[in-house]
Amino acid sequence: MLTFKNFNIADWFSFYRVIAAPFLILFLWLDERQLFAWFLFISYSTDAIDGYLARKLKITSPRGSQLDSFGDQITLVIGLIGLLIFENEFIRKNIIIIGVSFIPYIIQMIIAYYKYGKATAFHTYLAKLSAIIQSAFILYSLFFYPNYTLFYIMIVFGVLETLEEITLIFMYDNWASDVKGIYWAFRDKRRLKKHVK
């Protein structure tokens, strides 16, 4: 049975993002843009901290990777809802490009759940970079105004990262966590073949 004692310090930072979600929704409901932006900033910061701690203290685990991914997804969705509410005109102007860029993500989620029964947690370098760009765009938009250069960069990296995740799903028969990217996946597979021989 899983208890709170089983969680390590990195897990607790990931868990914070899950706990913070209802409060972020409350700030949206109360139309508190600045409070929402600051608490969202804290949530994004915990994403950087939990990954650093897990690697530094060598406490990475499949459960931790899954919890991290779950916290990331919730925070991203709430951040996007915040943009929809506070920057509605910008979203309406760019709804087509946003919708089209989400199609690969939806496909990736469907394939992952069909194949593994749960979301992926590859945490590739490209995924981390994409998450940083997404966070920067959303926070910049909430604190100041939407920046189109950052917006287009976010869209490009988001689509590239999702296509990489789809490729990795087809490369791994079983659910895997903390895969650095396609290059490293190919290298690991080559190494495995040499050991089998």
Image: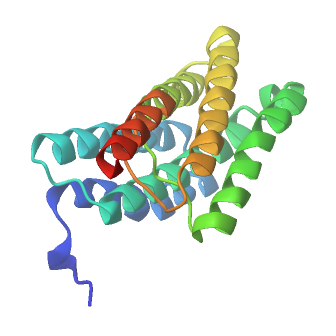
Q: Residue furthest top?
A: 149
From the top left corner, tell me how far across and down residue 46 is, in percent: 31, 44
Residue 194: image quadrant is: top left
Foreground of the two, 18 or 92: 18
Q: Residue furthest front?
A: 197
Foreground of the two, 158 or 108: 108
Location of the N terminus (image quadrant): bottom left
Question: From this viewpoint, is residue 41 visible?
Answer: no
Q: Is residue 191 above or below residue 12?
A: above
Q: Is residue 12 left or right of residue 164?
A: left
Residue 145: image quadrant is: top right
Q: How many marks?
A: 0
Residue in view at x 46 percent, y 27 percent = 183
Q: Is residue 97 left or right of residue 70?
A: right
Foreground of the two, 113 or 20: 113
From the top left corner, tell me how far across and down residue 112 is, in percent: 63, 59
Q: Is residue 165 above or below residue 143?
A: below
Residue in view at x 69 percent, y 24 percent = 155
Q: Is residue 22 above or below residue 13?
A: below
Coloration mode:
rainbow
From the top left corner, tell me how far across and down residue 13 is, in percent: 26, 53
Residue in view at x 39 percent, y 61 percent = 67
Residue in view at x 65 percent, y 13 percent = 147
Question: From this viewpoint, is residue 49 visible?
Answer: yes
From the top left corner, tell me how far across and down residue 184 is, in percent: 40, 32
Foreground of the two, 179 or 74: 179
Q: Residue furthest left?
A: 57
